[in-house]
Amino acid sequence: MPTQAPKPQLQQDKEARQFIETLEKTGQLVDVDEQQDTSKLPARVTHVRYPDRTVKRIRFTGTAYR
């Protein structure tokens, strides 16, 4: 019996969970509260997670333009 490809939404959900797990493992994602000043977080932190579980990118990493 042939295997069916995952539904697009299920695949997106799986990829999103994997992305979040990677950010957590590498220290790029931290939990914050609504009033926290995210500009004071270490440079390695690129994403924050609020109490309502919303994840937001706060900065990019990488080399500057040359």
Image (spheres, rainbow, N blue to C red):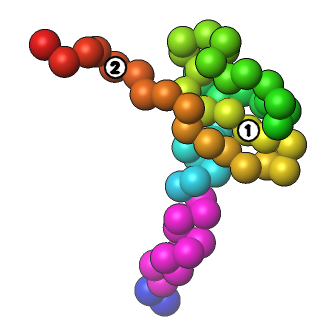
Neighbours of disc 2 within 10 Å: few (<14), some (14-19), many (20+): few
- Residue sitting nearer the eye, 48 or 28: 48
Labelled disc at residue 57: none
Above or below for 59 versus 52:
above
Local SS, label 2: loop
Q: Pointer 2: what residue?
A: 62
Q: Nearer the viewer, residue 54 or 34?
A: 34
Cα separation between marks 1 and 2: 21 Å
Q: Residue drawn at (82%, 37%), measured in percent from left and top?
A: 34
- The range drawn in magenta is 3-14
Amino acid carrying label 1: it is Arg
Which residue appears farthest toward the left when viewing the image? 66
Q: Residue at x 68, y 33 (%)?
A: 48
Image quarter for residue 26?
A: top right
Q: Is residue 10 magenta?
A: yes
- Amino acid at circle 2: Gly
Give the mark nearest the N terminus, 1 or 2.
1
Question: How crowded is the residue under tag 1: few (<14 C-alpha within 10 Å), some, or many (20+)?
Answer: some
Which residue is drawn at the image coordinates 79% and 25% (left, top)?
Answer: 36
Q: Position of residue 22 (x, y in %)?
A: 58, 34
Tell me if 34 is positioned left or right of 27 in this view. Answer: right
* Magenta stretch encompasses residue 50: no
* The one of 66 and 8 positioned closer to us in this rendering: 66
What label sits on residue 49 in the rendered view?
A: 1
Residue 32's spot in the image, x, y percent? 80, 29
Above or below, 5 relative to 24:
below
Q: Can residue 27 be seen?
A: no
- Image quarter where the C terminus lies is top left
Residue 18 lies left or right of residue 59; in this view the side is right
